[in-house]
Amino acid sequence: MNKLIEYIEMEEFKKILKEEKDKRFKLAYCLGMGSGLRISEIIGLKKEISSCCNSDLIEKRIEENNKKRKAYFCSKCKKEIKPNKFKRGSEWKIKPLTENQINLEKHQIRIFGKRGKERITTTSPWLNKTNIKLLPLNIERRTLQRRFKNLCKKVLNKNLHIHALRHGFGNYFVNVKNTPLPVVQTLLGHSNVSTTGIYTRANPKQAVDTVWENF
């Protein structure tokens, strides 16, 4: 049985937002929960290079023991590179989000993802002309992850990864607001609607309550 995804609920998120005092971190949380952005889409992601040849990594899916897994290979020597042998390069794989990607009047954020993929997602009521001027956010990935994790332990007594914000966005619109899956799929940038369907399985309490009401 697949493990249920971890997400943050709206009321929990409001508690986190109230406790956080740094405006930069607040903005990062709001982009995750309010717009469904990945951490790499908020603060950017540097290219990963191999430690053996200082060359770019090539990502492939290979079959092993009748299962497919992600594998990374050095573009120069073609050897498989384990995750602990990655190094961060100086060039951006995904550039940090900037103010000019946000249109508050149209409630739109233009996202530039990996391999040139683009999508439009929504802004949230937490974004305004003042706080988007803080973009791009110059925050280290580990710093942002650690800050959010420690805050969740302190305020919610939960061990949550920052990706729980993106899952919180998906759960809120699928299970609470009953938004059609294809709409949420578009906003989150999933290539397949079945991926978005994880949110219908993420909140078993709602499913149980719905069935009980029908009885």
Image: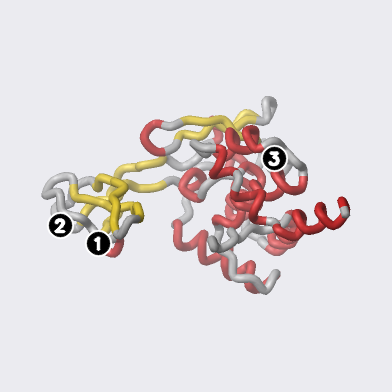
Seen at 60% across and 36% down, the residue is 187
- Quarter in which the C terminus is drawn: bottom right
Between the C-alphas of marks 1 and 2, the distance is 8 Å
For residue 23, say whether it is visible. no
Give the CA separation, mark 3 to mark 2: 44 Å
- Whether residue 110 sits left or right of residue 10 in the image: it is left
Tag 1 near tag 2, CB within 8 Å: yes
Marked residue nearer the N-terminal end (3 or 2): 2
**In front: 92, or 198?**
198
Secondary structure of the residue carrying numbered label 1: helix
Residue ID for mark 2: 52
Q: Check disc 3 and report the residue beneath it.
A: 124
Residue 12: % across, % down: 73, 61
Nearer to us in this view, 200 or 211: 211
Q: Which mark is residue 85?
A: 1
Which of marks 2 and 1 precedes in the sequence? 2
Residue displayed at 55% across by 42% down: 194
